[in-house]
Structure formats: structure tokens, C-alpha cells
Image: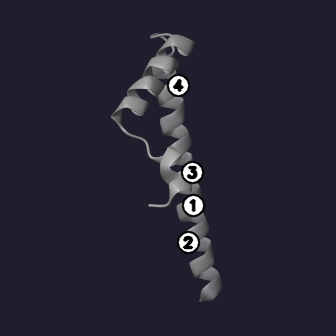
């Protein structure tokens, strides 16, 4: 692994630190809403990418 990529490695301490910061910023009541929105956004992205993949295959035929 090259030296310039070393800060990009995320371990358990960094994940815990990020979770604590998110909890402090948004509070316990807001986090489930944020995760629900994140999940639906990821689902829409996957659906759109599958749709785009299908349209590319149709153009090839």
C-alpha cells in the first residue's frame, strides 16, 4: 500500500468516532430518519443503474 493512501484506510476506531460525531450532531431521534432516507436513496440509485444497464443492452441489439 502506498503512503499517500494510508489516511484513506478506515478501521474500527475511525468508524466509532464517526458514529459518535453523527450521534452528537443529529441526536438519537433523527438518526433513524436519516438512515431511512439513505436507504431509499441507495435503492433509487441501484434501480436507476439497472435501468440504464438495460437500455444500453437494448441499444446493442
Identify the residue at the far right of this view. Answer: 59
Mark 2, residue position? 54
How packed mark 2 is, by other alpha carbons closer than 10 Å (few <14, some 14-19, many 20 or more), is: few
SS category of the residue bearing label 2 = helix
Quadrant where the N terminus lies?
Answer: bottom left
Numbered badge on residue 8 = none
Q: Are marks 3 and 2 in contact (CB under 8 Å)?
A: no
Lower position in the chain sequence, tag 1 or tag 2? 1
User: Residue at image x 45%, y 21%?
Assistant: 32
Query: Which one is in front in this view, the residue at disc 2 or the one at disc 4?
Result: 4
Mark 4, residue position? 34
Coordinates of residue 19 in the picture (x, y in percent): 44, 24
Mark 3, residue position? 45
- Relative to 53, say whether 9 is above or below: above
How packed mark 4 is, by other alpha carbons closer than 10 Å (few <14, some 14-19, many 20 or more), is: few
Mark 1, residue position? 49
Q: Nearer the viewer, residue 32 or 2?
A: 2
Q: Left of 41 or right of it: where is 36?
A: left
SS category of the residue bearing label 4 = helix
Coordinates of residue 13 in the picture (x, y in percent): 37, 30
Lower position in the chain sequence, tag 4 or tag 1? 4
Identify the residue at the far front of this view. Answer: 3
SS category of the residue bearing label 3 = helix
Amino acid at each position: 500500500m502506498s503512503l499517500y493512501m494510508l489516511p484513506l484506510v478506515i478501521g474500527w476506531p475511525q468508524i466509532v468516532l464517526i458514529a459518535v460525531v453523527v450521534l452528537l450532531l443529529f441526536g438519537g431521534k433523527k438518526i433513524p430518519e436519516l438512515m431511512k432516507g439513505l436507504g431509499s436513496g441507495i435503492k433509487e440509485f441501484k434501480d436507476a443503474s439497472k435501468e440504464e444497464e438495460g437500455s444500453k443492452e437494448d441499444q446493442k441489439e
